[in-house]
Structure formats: C-alpha cells, structure tokens
Amino acid sequence: MKNLKNYIYILAAAVFVTACKPNFNSNPAPGKGSLDLTRYISVGNSLTAGYADGGLYLNGQLNSYPSIIAQQMTSVNSSLTFNQPLFASSQANGSGYLKLTGFDASGNPVTSTVTSNLAYVGQATVPGFGTVNLMAKYTGNLDNYGVPGIKLLHLTSTLYPNVNPYFDRMLTTTSPNNTTTYLSLITSKSFTFFTNWLGNNDALGYATGGGGGYTGADVLTDPTTFGQLYTLLITTLTANGAKGACATIPDVTTIPYFTTVTYPLVLAGVQKAVPSVQALYINAATNTTDATGATETYAPRAATANDLFVLTFPTSLLGSTTAGVGTYPYGLDPRNPIESKYVLDANEQTLVKNAVNSYNTTIKTIAASKGLAVFDAFTFLTNIKASGYVINGLNLNSNYISGGIFSLDGVHLTPRGYSIVANQFITAINSTYGSSIPLANVSAYNGVIFP
C-alpha cells in the first residue's frame, strides 16, 4: 500500500512538472494577431514587381516577394487571393532578360539576352517626351502594384503613366492618354493591409548611372521633397484604417553592381597588356556640397580603390583613341578620362549615402507615427555584405552570381533572394502585430540558374 501511495505521489509530481514545462515550439500555430488580411496590396517598384536578371518576365513575377508573402498569409486567411499583372504564357519573357550561358577562359560569366516571346505590342508618341514602347495590357484584378522604374517622385504625376510601359499596361486607357496617378491607382479599391517599398529608385537611378557629370544624368530626389511625398503616401494608405509594413532604402554601394568590377581588378587587367600603365583616370565629382547631386562640378583625376565601377563598364574601351573624347587613350590619360556614367566616385557615394540616410530617417519616423511594421533593408543587406547569411544550411552572400541572392543584373534579386526579403517583411509584421505568419522555405527557391 505504501509503495502504491509513493507511486501516486511520483505520478502526480510528473504530471505537475509536465504541465509546467515551457513550450519551446519554434513554429507556433499560424495566427493573424491584430491583422485584417481581407485584401493585401503591395506598393513599390521593380523589386516589388519581381524584376530580375535585367528584365521583368513571368518567372520573376511568380517569385516576387509580395507573392511569397501572400502565399504565407494564406496559412492565416485561406480565402486570401493575391493578383499580379502576370504576362501571358505566349509573352512570358516580358521585357526580355539576361541568361547565363557559361564562362569564358578567364572564368568571367557569359550572358545572352532572351528576345523571344516578349510582351511588346507597339509604340506611342508622348508629346514633350518622345516615343515609348507599349506592352500588352493586363486587365484582371490587381493587388501587386510594383512598377519597375518608378520613384516616389512620380507618386502624383499624370505624365509618368504615359512614359512607363509597365505602368501603362496596368491601366485601361493607353499612352499618351493616361491621366491616372500612381497614388490614385493603388487606392482606387479598398484594402486592409499593405507593404510599401517605394523610394529605392530615388537614389538608385543616380547611383547606377554613375552619378552626375554628364548630359542626361539622373539626380537624387531632394530629401525635403522625399519627406513630403512619403508623408502623403503613408497618410493616404492608412486613411481608412489599413495596417502595413514599410522597408527602408538599402545602401546601394553594397550590391554586386558596384562591388564586382573593382578598380584593382580593372587596373591589373590593363597592366597585363601594358605593364607601364600606373593608373586609370576618371571624370570625378570635386565636392559633396549639393544634397541632390544636380550641380556638382567634375574634373579628371586618378582613380582609387574607393571609386566604384559599375558592373556594365565596358573594359574593352580602355586605351581606345576613339572612345570618350578621342585622340588620347581612353582612361589611361587624364585628357580622356573614363566617363562619369561608368564610375560612382567617392564624392558621389557620399552624396548617395547622405540622401539615403535622410530618406531612411523619414521612413522610420513616419512609419512609427502610424504604428507600421518596418523591415530595415539598409541594415539587413549591409550585414549580408559584411558577414554573409546562413539559413537552412545555405551559405549565402552578396557576391555576383555565386552569392545566390542577387540576379544577373547585380541589382535585383533571385527567387531565393526575394524569399529572404519576404521572410524579413513577415518577421517585422509578426513582431508588430502579434501575428504568427509562417516563414517561407528559402531552400525551395533558386539562386542564379547555371547552364
């Protein structure tokens, strides 16, 4: 009897310990928290649209980060639908894109441009602008409003939908007769949740164009103007009680577009052919006093390792006496320096970083005032550049091609990269709204596809 009593005591203690044992489940049951996911929309540019490999095409669209987020949200709301302006199968290659075909004898990647099954259907003449290409219209329901090329600066422009074929294809009218602004398009139907990643191109266009110093160069959006427009955007998106998540603007100097073709690498290549060459010369900004980069002064100087060459720099031009201004060997003589469009010099980098820092302060401040979630893309992608990223046994980094995150254009992401971004958005959303939307399986998405 005594033994039976002891057994009961032991059993009761075991039950008590079991009942009090903490739950270490790292995958909680899906839950919506305070979210209303009746309708989710995504606002943004090429990254939002799923642009990759230098173009917008069907496979990229299907692997856009908003599409991945929406797929994960269905665990919380099974009735959620997410409609994208997908290209038809007969026009699946959209704008065309780059494809990796192999590597040359030196190990450099060789790419070709896919030009079949495109979505272009004609041209239009826009008064005061010129001729623009037109793409096949999308006429279905729309939840992904990603428009490649759009800036926050274009938010209320009635001209812009006429000069951007990606925007035009979302509208019922056709260029040059569009009058719908981007802000009015994205708010034309009610929604309950949004993600917003507008603002990248307000810095990226200037940077990828090598800064200023030449005719037709892009300029940085004035930080004050950026702040006014971002306030308008978020105020409008939240006017009817919608919740959402925003992302900051990345440091553009951390992407492969600027870190692959380095000055030491280019100089070493020249010295193999001409050992006497000691320096390359660039047309560089002489100061950093203008916040928009619009009135910088430029002068030739010797390049340094702090100057960033763009991924598309045609190194075959070096030494040519017909490139640039001609007569003198291109890039090897200060009288015929490498054009600014091929180099984001040290002073231009300072201009970009100052602008981006200002933009991000605006984004965080306005998002916080509305209680929105924030994915700090600036910090996240900077950390990947510094330390890489390990997930699901995958060792990823921001190297060109081999890193697995960035596509062949060195700016936009691979499906794997977009799945990582989707997860960062989801993590921020869960943290802010008490939801438990499950993360995507990054291993299920590919990096650069090898031949």
Image (spheres, rainbow, N blue to C red):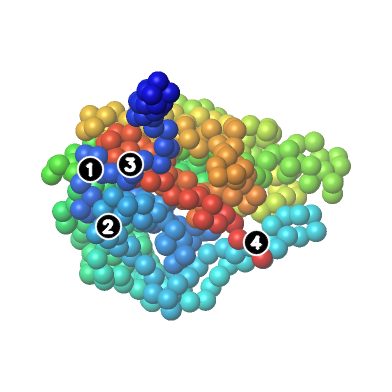
Please say if the residues under marks 1 and 4 sit with CB atoms less than 8 Å apart.
no
Q: Nearer the viewer, residue 334 or 86?
A: 86
Side of 288 relative to 145 (left or right) = right
Examine the image and state in which quarter residue 51 appears: bottom left
> In terms of sequence position, does the residue under pointer 3 or pointer 4 come before the other?
3
The residue depicted at 38 percent of the width and 24 percent of the height is: 1
The residue depicted at 56 percent of the width and 70 percent of the height is: 114
Q: Residues within 10 Å of mark 1 (few under 14, many from 20)?
A: some
Dot 3 corresponds to which residue?
436
Rendered view: 10 above or below 55: above
Residue kind at label 2, given as amino acid type: Ser
SS label for mark 1: loop
SS label for mark 3: loop
Dot 4 corresponds to which residue?
450
Side of 122 relative to 243 (left or right) = right
Q: Residues within 10 Å of mark 2 (few under 14, many from 20)?
A: few
Dot 1 corresponds to which residue?
35
